[in-house]
Image (cartoon, grey):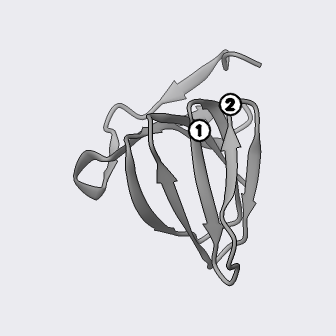
Amino acid sequence: MSQYDKVSVVKKANVYFDGKCVSHTVVLADGTKKTVGVILPASLTFNTGAPEIMEGVGGSCRVKLKGESDWKAYGEGQSFNVPGNSSFEIACDEPYHYVCHFE
């Protein structure tokens, strides 16, 4: 799917790490919330509350989940799951466009 129809968008952006990650929250007609954003070239660590699925829609990244020792590469059309109450490291050499799906 290349777009979401019939959504509400929260106007104020979510800005993290001094602007290295910027996203907007979208609310689907059924009340489901997602964030759509971009991570600029950087190495960052994110903490999670709820479980989430990160879907790559452009660019690429490397990810290391909490408790794992190996980095895994992800690109456009690929997703990775992050447990709730956890964290992950992400390294991007180019802008990485994503949709974060909250479970």
Image coordinates of residue 30 in percent, x first then y, are 74, 35
The residue lying toward the viewer, choosing from 62 and 87, is 62
- Helix, strand or loop at mark 2: loop
Of the pair 7 and 46, the residue shown nearer to us: 46
Q: Which residue is mark 1?
A: 60
Q: Secondary structure under badge 1?
A: strand
Quarter of the image where the N terminus is located: top right
State whether residue 32 appears in this view: no
Looking at the picture, does residue 28 appear above or below residue 25?
A: above
Residue hosting label 2: 76
Q: Amino acid at mark 1?
A: Ser
Could you say where residue 9 lies in the image, as x and y percent from the top left? 47, 29
Residue type, label 2: Glu
- Between 101 and 90, the residue placed more toward the observer is 90
Residue at x 26%, y 46% (from the top left corner): 19
Label 1: how many Cα within 10 Å (few below 14, some 14–19, many 20+)? many
